[in-house]
Amino acid sequence: MQQTTDTTFYHLIQQEYETDRLTSRANPIVTIGELYMPVLQCDVCGTQRCGGQQQRHEAVTDPELARRLDGGPLAFGEWWGLAAKVREHLNLAEDVMPGDTFGLPTYQITLDTASDFLFPNLRAVISQRVLNAFQSAGLSGYHTIEPGLVPGKRVRNELPPYYELCVIGTAWRKGTIVSTACNHCGRRQRTLVSLEIDPERWDGSDIFTVDGVTSIIGASARARDLIVEAGFTNVQCRDFRIPTFVDRYLLEHSPLSA
């Protein structure tokens, strides 16, 4: 595939289908048994801090500690007490955040599938075919981990390998500002003025997160061309400049929790 200087950027999302049933059949994957750092309930600003920059940490091996990592929510003091114990247990240099996960993920595949992309819980999981193509093209901005895969009762064939896409590239929209919304709980907010990706705030990666939000996965023109030319299934690359209903809502209700 030829190199390109095109600075059009694309949102990497699940393909759209006419019915919910078709959507479910193309995306037969659910997360099971995952441990989450709980939501933080602030007793000053009154909001729940869910976190948009979730990180994956090593597995928590303390059963009592693991039992408490159910996503919450927890009151301010209780949350920070739990966070301190988790940080000590894992010997972390930095604080954990609401929504952070622990250990390798496990997914249940509920139907026989040949989809190249699967999207469980705002993440992206890719097939061996996609991984091979990304590696052959030298795409940047990501690494992968191999999750546990469990067949559902309706699966008849051996499960193919899949890999969770862990995005490390970064980009920001034009004019986006992140500021502190509450000094007590540390909740931040994003002020959006545009949906367009700013080439000056893009690190050059082919795969990247947007505005520091790990669930928004972007693709360069080079990555988009590869995905389209290869005919990968259950994925679409939507130009960030073309707003959806959700995009308009986000602009109208900015600033947003970050």
Image (cartoon, rainbow, N blue to C red):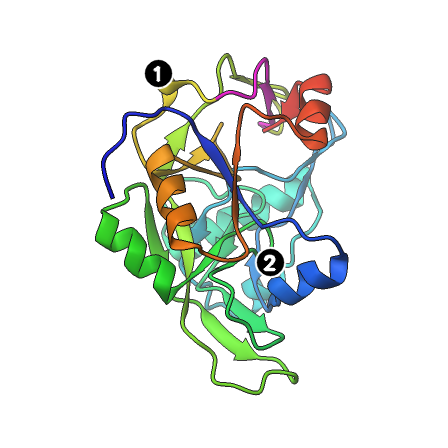
Give the secondary structure at mark 1.
Answer: helix
Can you say which quadrant of the picture contains the N terminus? Answer: top left
194 falls in the magenta region? yes
The residue beneath circle 1 is 200
Where's residue 146, x and y in %?
38, 66
The residue beneath circle 2 is 69
Where's residue 166, x and y in %?
40, 50
x 65%, y 59%: residue: 70
Q: Which residues are magenta?
A: 186-196
Amino acid type of the residue that numbered disc 2 sits on in the rendered structure: Leu
Q: Residues within 10 Å of mark 2 (few under 14, many from 20)?
A: many
Q: With 73 as the anchor, is 201 left or right in this view?
A: left
Give the secondary structure at mark 2.
Answer: loop
Whether 29 is drawn above or below 79: the answer is: below
Give the spatial CA distance, label 1 vs label 2: 39 Å
Residue 235, numbered label: none
